[in-house]
Amino acid sequence: MKRVMVTGSTGFIGRHSLAGLMAAGYEVHASTIEGPAPGLEGVNWHMIDLLALDQVEDLLASLCPSHLLHFAWYAAPGKYWSAPENVLWEQASLALLRAFTRHGGHRAVMAGTCAEYDWNYGFCSEQYTPLAPRTLYGTCKRALQMTIQAYAAQAQLSAAWGRIFFLYGPHEHPSRLVASVIQALLNNEPALCSHGNQVRDFLYVQDVADAFVALLESSVVGPVNIASGQPVQLKAIIGAIAEQLKRTELVHLGALSVAGDEPPFIVADIRRLQTEVGWQPKYDITTGLAQTIAWWRKQRGV
């Protein structure tokens, strides 16, 4: 049986990957520092601090997983872009991969970010767009991917790197765009937003998780963009939320200022994901937002 270790398993993406992994025939071992996520039967939970190298070594020695799906990272909203913890997680991720390889692992997929790209180009292609991170977060992710690529070639390890773009959905942090607008409108409060002219590439979180499972199942190596490939203005997403909740009068575009270096356009080239991995999104924006709104209503007992 295929045995996978999943890190960040109670995080935004990780929790959505577990059912898909079990459906794909994996014996799933999920590492967590917070405790198991409720409602997921069949997952083997392991309480572990991934920054403690002895704990990582002991767990991998006992499990000897064939596959690794690594989501864990420092992700405090508003802080992770420049937090020194990024360096710790870069180092811990390399130690994790080395231990995984030592104990017989042969296929690893790790989570990267669109922040590795030079956003001045707007259209982000794995093959053609330069990599020039603006932040410590993007820099550490980029450095990790480069090291993994070289290490995997030397260790005869099959390794892929999923570059995540913009996402939304159930369990999203309340301060992020989609979640914050939904909550404001459910509270009958004004949703204060920027002008919303920025163009981004959004993908529903279940699709993101499913894409990572498909990437793990494939033999594709190297960086792969995990995104929809569809450009959408932020104000269109905000407007769609308001229309579904029938609270369009509460949306205030232009109420918040935009940083001078805010990129106007960030969209992914997803041809590798489509043609080599063979994966397509299942949710469009309308359906994904409806699912997300329903989840937030349920949390609030509405």
Image (cartoon, helix red, strand yellow):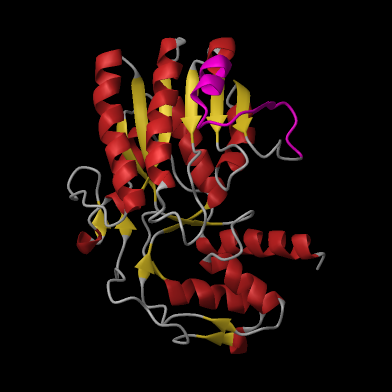
* Residue sticking out furthest to the right: 301
Along the horizontal axis of the image, is 294 left or right of 50? Answer: right
9 drawn magenta: no
Along the horizontal axis of the image, is 52 left or right of 278? Answer: right
* 116, 124: nearer the viewer: 116
Specify start and end residues of the magenta stretch as a single range: 39-59
Along the horizontal axis of the image, is 167 left or right of 243? Answer: left
Residue 230 rendering spot, x and y as whole percentages: 38, 59
Quadrant in which residue 122 is drawn: bottom left
Along the horizontal axis of the image, is 53 left or right of 181? Answer: left
Residue 19 rendering spot, x and y as whole percentages: 64, 34
Q: Is residue 245 visible?
A: no
Residue 83 rendering spot, x and y as whole percentages: 41, 52
Quadrant in which residue 87 is drawn: top left
Residue drawn at (70%, 37%) of the image: 35
Q: Which quadrant does the N terminus fall into? A: top right
Q: In this view, does 292 lie above or below 129?
A: below
Q: Which quadrant does the C terminus fall into? A: bottom right
41 drawn magenta: yes
Residue drawn at (30%, 67%) of the image: 265
Q: In this view, does 292 lie above or below 235?
A: above
Residue 115 rendering spot, x and y as whole percentages: 33, 53
Please state the total of marks drawn on the protein image: 0
Q: Can residue 248 be seen in this view?
A: yes
* Residue sticking out furthest to the bottom: 249
Residue drawn at (36%, 40%) of the image: 273
